[in-house]
Structure formats: C-alpha cells, structure tokens
Image: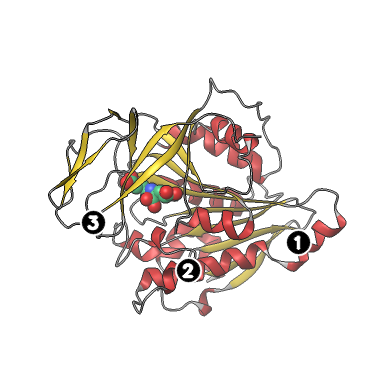
Amino acid sequence: MLHTLMESKDFLAFTLAQSNTDVMTTSFSFELGQHTRVEVWDCGVIVFEPHGDTSKDIVLSCAVHGNETAPIELCNDLIKRLLLQTIQAEQRLMFLIGNPEAIKLNRRFIDENLNRLFNGGHSIGETQNPERVRAKALEQYVERFYLNQTYQNQVMSGSMPRQRIHYDLHTAIRASKHEEFAIYPYCPEKKYSSEQIMFLAGAGIDTILFHNEPTTTFSYFSSHHFQADAFTVELGKVYPMGQNDMSRFSALDERLVGLITANDLPILPLDMKRVNLYQVARSIDKRFEDFCFSFANDVENFTAFQRGEVLATEGGEAVIVEHPMEVIVFPNAKVPVGQRTLLCLTPASADNIE
Ligand SMILES: O=C(O)CCC(=O)N[C@@H](CCC(=O)O)C(=O)O
Ligand SMILES: [Zn+2]
C-alpha cells in the first residue's frame, strides 16, 4: 500500500481505490526524509507529524459532501506537495477526506447528510448507515489527533498554549454574491477571533456568518469539544471534479501553505472595510413535504429580502421575512422534514470580536 501511495503521491486516488470496509488494513506509517512522520490511519485519513517542535494542530477536511470537489482538489494538491517534499510541514497536520464512498458516486451523500451527524447525531435513533459510521469514526480521529499526549506535553513545557485549528472545506450548491465565505460555529462562551477572521479575509474568504445555535456540523464539533478555531468554509459554487478554476483559491492555498510550513503571512488588524459580517438570525426548518420557495432556483446566496416578503410556503402557511431585511443563504427545499432548509441572516457588528 505504501508503495502505491509513494509512487503516485496521489492520496485521493489512493483513498478512492480503498474499500470502505477494510478500515484496519489501511493503516500504516512511513518517514519523509529525516523530518516528518506520516501516518495513514484509515481510508481518507492522513497525518503529518514533524520531528521538530510544533505549536499548532491543524485539521483540514474536505468531501464531507462527496460532490463538493474544489476542496478535494485543493487538499489533494497540498498532500501531493508534502509527499513530494516540495513543501515541508512544520506544524502537526491532519487531512480528512470525509466521505470517499460519496465521492465515488459523485453524490452529496449516500444515505444521510454527513454534516448533520456530528456531536453525537450519528447515534440518535436506531438507524445505521455509511454516513453514521463515518461521522463517528471522524469524531474519533479528530479526538485522537487533538488529544495526542506527546504533543499535549509540549503544551506543558512550552510558554504558549497549542492552537487547534479546523477548516472544514465545502462548496455551495448555489452561486453566492460573496463567493467565498465561512460559518463561525456558535460559541457563546468566548469572543470571536479577529486573527482568524483576518486570516480568512487574507485567504479570499471575506464574509463571515456567526451561527446562533449549536449544530450537528463538523466545525461545531471541533469548536465545541476541543476549543478549536473551527470554521465551515465555502469555496464558491459546486462543479464536477476537474472543472474547478483552482486559480480562484490561490490566496487560500498560499495562506494554508504559510500556516502548514510555519511561514505565516502577516495578518492585518480587524478591518471592517475588508470583511462582511452576518449574524444567523434564524434557521428555517422544513415542517411539511410540500415546502416550496417563493424565489427561483438561480437566486444567489446573500440575496436580501425586505420585511413582509414571502420566502416560502408550506402546509398552507407562508414563511415571511420578520426583520427589516433578511439575507438568505443555503436555500434547499430537498431536505428531509425536520432539517434546515434555509438560513436567514442580518448584518452583524464587530462587538463580539477581540
Ligand atoms: O449550498 C448549500 O445549500 C449547502 C452547502 C453546505 O454544504 N454547507 C454546509 C454548512 C455547514 C454549517 O452551517 O456550518 C452544510 O449545509 O452542511
Ligand atoms: Zn457542503
């Protein structure tokens, strides 16, 4: 197996060639030069551990939705450069290819939306399916990575606490007025990080949505359980594999290389002229099978609606804009009853950012 991966340096192809059933047989490790230990823990799970001191534990995940291809290409290219040793990790780093079986089928998911199954969502009820198994396993890999005792001890002896980071990379179903944006998971117990917001802005992700409640997403899991600086990051609109214009994400690629190689590019102080901030005002959950939006399928994310306008109808009732203005994101009527069908946003201030 090692031979196949080291010959191609293509972790995605290697992952997709594995079966989702031979979990244990896919784990192995090897050295890159004298500087980095590489461990493959499972199908789509690869960890880079530099031999020198490190201060950050970074998780980069993609393909939590199998058809969201730009993040998969971005991560695979970073892994390739690490394996070719054209870049060298100076921070601990784990890549997760979320749902390899869904990638193979070019589908968002097989049985159930993986990004609705974290924080224990995978164990609610009697249902078992590939996504529930994978969500539980991904949670365990994140825990094992963040709580590695060897590196925890570096915290004890070092002066600065280690920083945990998790960027869960996605693409949106629709086009967006702000092409690249990030969701900041609900974290009422702490202030938002201006450093993270400006890191993302420097990476071309200039729009932040502050979530208003706990969710069953992967980024909320890492934020809530491990106090990671965790975000769901949306990289434009979904396109088939190979049809993404990856030059649109060159700023992100450059920032990630800086982060991984500990050659961090300078981060500007918070500048409200460089960022668009939104607060999630409410999440509209689907209540009836006949849920139907009042706007067209090509209406973009971040389109604004005025108080009183009808956003959708269901069960003979209208879903109406409540605030003076609400900005919509992620409209999707094809979700099961009980799940989020739309987020409504209002402009946010910088009050909770430090
Ligand atoms: O475009 C869409 O409708 C969905 C894109 C997507 O997968 N978004 C994530 C957001 C997760 C979060 O709220 O942090 C999702 O729906 O899982
Ligand atoms: Zn997604």
- Amino acid residing under circle 1: Tyr
Q: Residue 260 at what x, y percent from top left?
A: 65, 46
> Which of the 4 image quadrants contains residue 108?
bottom left
Q: CA distance from mark 1 to mark 3?
A: 46 Å
- Residue 139 in the image, given as x and y percentages of width and height: 53, 66
Q: Amino acid at mark 2?
A: Gly
Q: Which residue is mark 3?
A: 287
Give the alpha-carbon distance from disc 2 to disc 1, as whole Å: 26 Å
Residue 323 placement, left or right of 191: left
Pointer 2 or 1: first along the chain: 2
Report the mark closest to the observer, 1 or 3: 3
Residue 350 in view in this figure:
yes
Residue type highlighted by circle 3: Arg
Disc 1 C-beta below 8 A from ligand 1: no
Q: State whether residue 10 appears in this view.
A: no
Secondary element type, mark 2? loop
Q: Is residue 259 above or below residue 8?
A: above
Q: Nearer the viewer, mark 2 or mark 1?
A: 2
- Number of numbered labels in the structure image: 3
User: Which residue corresponds to mark 1?
Assistant: 151
Query: How many residues crowd around disc 2 within 10 Å: few (fewer than 14), some, or many (20 or more)?
Result: some
Tell me the residue at 77%/58% (across/down). 51
Q: Alpha carbon of mark 2 to alpha carbon of mark 3: how far?
A: 23 Å
Callout 3: CB less than 8 Å from ligand 1: no
Quadrant assignment for the C terminus:
top right
